[in-house]
Image: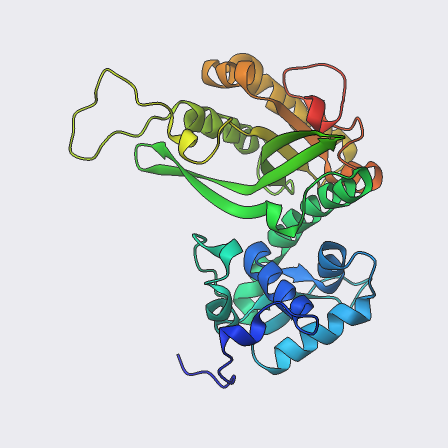
């Protein structure tokens, strides 16, 4: 592919007092795929100004590393979503935080606009956790939220979770490491299809990879998820895009799947499962009692599911 952007050595983007924010913006867009100026400010410089982030983004756009697509928002006609160009994607692919991540180049504004609504909603779901961590003295930053992580679940199929979250609760000298599979639902699929995601997580929980070219052995080597996680992450559904009644009905359907599907019921006996409304997370924080346990019971913080 021919590029009009100048060739920039990777060393030029090494962290320094002058370039650290520039590097962080590129890394954030590479990891989170897309974000608005306001989201990048909340993520990287919550106490800084919007103009600070805008200056960095405009400089990166002028050198051909990022581009933007307008958002269909009548109330905010000048709001855009930023994403990496193919040149920006190549520039960031060897950053340590991105090693092992699949490439995600977007080659046109049209392609970017198709991915915008869901991608930005996943970023919205991340920001309340980051704000809670700052307020409570916990550990959870921009690089502790990895979108679109794929896992094998057998029979050639894969489960792609919207995001994997790493979060450390700090209580004095005690540190409690938590992980979560986050599913962001914008009410664009049927409630039944949403509930079927629980079956996929139950399959991941039980799936054991077999050595290639060998018959299935009676002695299990352990579930495949142990390759990535010491403990199976809790499964968190974040719902938005519909009336409160509709969202409550979707939570009820998730609870019904837990109650009636044997594989999901087995998962629920070992793994914390919960659902919350995105607007509640933004208004009250994930540490508030806004999470409905899918096994039943009163709402509670996500750490207490």
Residue sitting nearer the eye, 52 or 239:
52
Q: Residue placed at 77% from the left, 28% from the top?
A: 290
Across and down, in percent, residue 217 comes to: 21, 20
Give the color scheme: rainbow, by chain, secondary structure or one colour. Answer: rainbow
Q: Is residue 161 above or below residue 287?
A: below
Residue sitting nearer the eye, 243 or 91:
91
240 relative to 96 in the view: left or right? right
Query: In the rendered image, is residue 78 in sight?
Result: no
Across and down, in percent, residue 17 comes to: 70, 70
Q: Residue placed at 60% from the left, 39% from the top?
A: 166
The C terminus, quarter of image: top right
Query: In the rendered image, is residue 196 in sight?
Result: yes
Q: Is residue 124 above or below residue 215?
A: below
190 relative to 200 in the view: left or right? right
Say which quarter of the image contains residue 298.
top right
Residue sitting nearer the eye, 25 or 3:
25
Across and down, in percent, residue 201 comes to: 48, 28
Q: Residue placed at 80% from the left, 64% from the top?
A: 76
Across and down, in percent, residue 29 comes to: 60, 61
231 relative to 152 in the view: left or right? right
Quick one: which residue is furthest to the front in this view?
Answer: 173
169 relative to 103 in the view: left or right? right
The N terminus, quarter of image: bottom left
Q: Residue placed at 53% from the left, 16% from the top?
A: 270
Q: Is residue 292 above or below residue 183?
A: above
């Amino acid at each position: 592919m021919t590029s009009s952007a100048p060739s920039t050595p990777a060393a030029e983007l090494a962290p320094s007092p002058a370039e650290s924010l520039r590097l962080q913006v590129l890394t954030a867009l590479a990891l989170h795929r897309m974000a608005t100026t306001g989201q990048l400010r909340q993520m990287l410089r919550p106490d800084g100004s919007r103009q600070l982030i805008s200056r960095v983004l405009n400089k990166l756009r002028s050198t051909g590393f990022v581009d933007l697509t307008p958002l269909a928002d009548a109330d905010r006609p000048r709001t855009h979503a930023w994403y990496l160009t193919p040149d920006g994607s190549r520039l960031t692919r060897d950053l340590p935080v991105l090693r092992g991540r699949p490439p995600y180049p977007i080659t046109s504004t049209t392609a970017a606009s198709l991915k915008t609504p869901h991608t930005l909603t996943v970023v919205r779901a991340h920001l309340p956790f980051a704000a809670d961590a700052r307020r409570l003295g916990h550990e959870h930053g921009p690089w502790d939220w990895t979108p679109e992580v794929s896992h094998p679940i057998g029979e050639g199929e894969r489960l792609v979770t919207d995001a994997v979250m790493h979060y450390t609760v700090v209580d004095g000298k005690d540190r409690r490491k938590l992980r979560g599979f986050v599913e962001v639902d914008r009410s664009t699929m049927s409630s039944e299809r949403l509930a079927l995601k629980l079956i996929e997580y139950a399959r991941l929980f039980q799936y054991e990879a077999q050595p290639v070219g060998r018959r299935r052995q009676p002695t299990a080597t352990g579930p495949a998820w142990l390759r990535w996680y010491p403990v199976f992450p809790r499964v968190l559904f974040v719902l938005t895009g519909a009336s409160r009644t509709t969202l409550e009905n979707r939570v009820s359907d998730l609870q019904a799947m837990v109650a009636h599907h044997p594989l999901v019921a087995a998962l629920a006996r070992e793994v914390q499962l919960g659902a919350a409304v995105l607007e509640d997370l933004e208004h009250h924080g994930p540490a508030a009692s806004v999470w409905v346990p899918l096994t039943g019971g009163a709402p509670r913080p996500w750490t207490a599911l």
